[in-house]
């Protein structure tokens, strides 16, 4: 799950596995695989970062060898 903020300032969690698309119109809009849409305060880049971190936490995305420190 990733935590994001609605435009009214309320936090909520989304299951990142169901995210189909993230766009900026200029507001960031997250579309789920079932067609539901959510407009959030976070930037597209921040949402993608949170999705990637979530995938790493549940071992869907491996860490690249050149990125390890």
Image: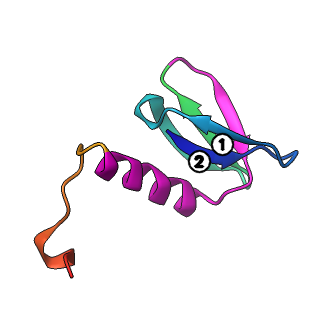
Q: Where is the C terminus found, in terms of image quarters? A: bottom left
Q: How is the image coloured?
A: rainbow
The reply, left or right, for residue 59 in relation to residue 16 is left
Residue drawn at the location 66% of the way across and 29% of the way down: 37
Of residues 42 and 55, the one nearer the viewer is 55
Of residues 21 and 1, the one nearer the viewer is 1
User: Which residue of the protein is positioned furthest toward the bottom in this rendering?
Assistant: 69
Spatial CA distance of label 2 from label 1 is 5 Å
The reply, left or right, for residue 34 in relation to residue 37 is left
Query: How many numbered markers are drawn?
Result: 2
Residue pointed to by mark 1? 29
Residue drawn at the location 61% of the way across and 37% of the way down: 13
Q: Secondary structure at mark 2?
A: strand
Packing grade of label 1 (10 A; few <14, some 14-19, many >=20) is: many
Question: Which mark is on residue 14?
Answer: none
Q: Position of residue 10 (x, y in %)?
A: 81, 43
Q: Position of residue 28 (x, y in %)?
A: 67, 50
Inspect the magenta stretch and tell me whether residue 62 lies in it.
no
Q: Earlier in the sequence, mark 2 or mark 1?
A: 2
Q: Secondary structure at mark 1?
A: strand
User: Which residue of the protein is positioned furthest toward the right in this rendering?
Assistant: 8
Are the residues flagged by discs 2 and 1 in contact, CB closer than 8 Å? Answer: yes
- In the figure, 28 relative to 20: above or below? below
Q: Position of residue 66 (x, y in %)?
A: 14, 78
Residue drawn at the location 57% of the way across and 20% of the way down: 35
Region in magenta? 34-57
Figure quadrant of residue 12 = top right
Question: Which mark is on residue 23?
Answer: 2
Packing grade of label 2 (10 A; few <14, some 14-19, many >=20) is: some
Of residues 15 and 38, the one nearer the viewer is 15
């Amino acid at each position: 799950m990733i935590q994001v903020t609605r435009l009214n300032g309320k936090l909520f969690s989304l299951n990142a596995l169901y995210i189909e698309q993230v766009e900026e119109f200029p507001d960031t809009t997250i579309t789920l695989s079932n067609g539901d849409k959510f407009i959030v305060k976070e930037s597209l880049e921040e949402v993608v970062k949170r999705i990637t971190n979530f995938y790493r936490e549940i071992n869907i995305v491996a860490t690249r060898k050149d990125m390890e420190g």
